[in-house]
Amino acid sequence: MSLEQKPPYTVYLGLGANLGNRAENIRAAIAALRAAEGIEVTAISPLYETEPWGVKEQPRFLNAAAAIVSLLSPRSLLTLCQRIEKALGRVREVRWGARTIDIDLLHIPGVVCRTPELTLPHPYLTQRAFVLIPLAAIAPDLAVEGRKIADWAAEVEGKDGVQRWEDPSGR
């Protein structure tokens, strides 16, 4: 792990859900992050409805991005996110399969990590429209691999399948 900085870290997260009440699952994950010691949620994107990626035969997802400031190490933050996922009913059976909630660590400026448990920046960050478009909504000027997130989002394959979602409950 290469750490060019010490805590606190600005961390960009991707959130997704395609089982149960998708919007409520994302809201519950954000509420759990807000309640966690050493975490401050600083930005949340709108929700976007997206096509499944990887395993295509599953329900459509809702996706969002969040920015947080974390006093936790990247590994401790990963553990926290996995605890939140489990508490919200996440079961890991099929890679890229359906889930109640997914919380991915996408990018921590100044941090590069390549371990079996955690890779930063996220290895598919620049390839996934469902990640780039919500992330561009909160951090368009964030640089990843020498390019702004807004530039990655403008050119990513599949961007037409990412539509801003309007909550029918009005929340």
Image (tube, helix red, strand yellow):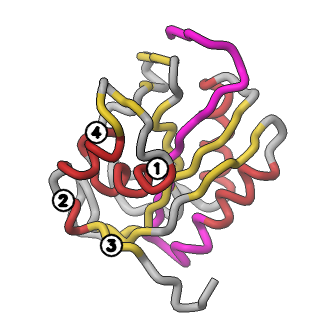
Alpha carbon distance from label 3 to label 2: 11 Å
Q: Earlier in the sequence, mark 1 or mark 3?
A: 1
Secondary structure type for disc 1: loop
User: Residue 23 at what x, y percent from top left?
Assistant: 55, 73
Q: CA distance from mark 1 to mark 3?
A: 26 Å
Q: Image height check: is 36 above or below 164?
A: above
User: What's the mark number on residue 92?
Assistant: 1
- Residue pointed to by mark 4: 126
Distance, label 4 to label 1, CA atoms, is 24 Å
**Is residue 64 shown in magenta?**
no
Image x and y of residue 57, in percent: 22, 68
Q: Which residue in the protein does label 2 denote? A: 158
Q: Residue at x 28, y 39 (%)?
A: 126
- Pick whichever of labels 3 and 4 is earlier in the sequence: 4
Helix, strand or loop at label 2? It is: loop
Please tell me which of labels 4 and 1 falls first in the chain.
1
Depicted 48 relative to depicted 144: above or below:
below
- Using residue 42 as the reference point, say whether residue 161 is left or right of it: left
Quadrant for residue 164, please give it.
Answer: bottom left
Going from N to C along the chain, the mark reached first, 2 or 4, is 4
Crowding at mark 4 (Cα within 10 Å: few <14, some 14-19, many 20+): many
Numbered disc 4: secondary structure: helix
Q: Is mark 1 in CB contact (under 8 Å) with mark 2?
A: no
Q: Residues within 10 Å of mark 2 (few under 14, many from 20)?
A: some
Amino acid residing under circle 3 = Gln
Per the model, the C-alpha gap separating discs 1 and 2 is: 25 Å
- At 61% from the left and 24% from the top, the residue drawn is 75
What residue does disc 3 label? Answer: 163
Amino acid at pointer 4: Thr
* Picture quadrant where residue 145 is located: top left
Residue 157, relative to residue 37: is it above or below?
A: below
Name the front one of labels 1 and 3: 3
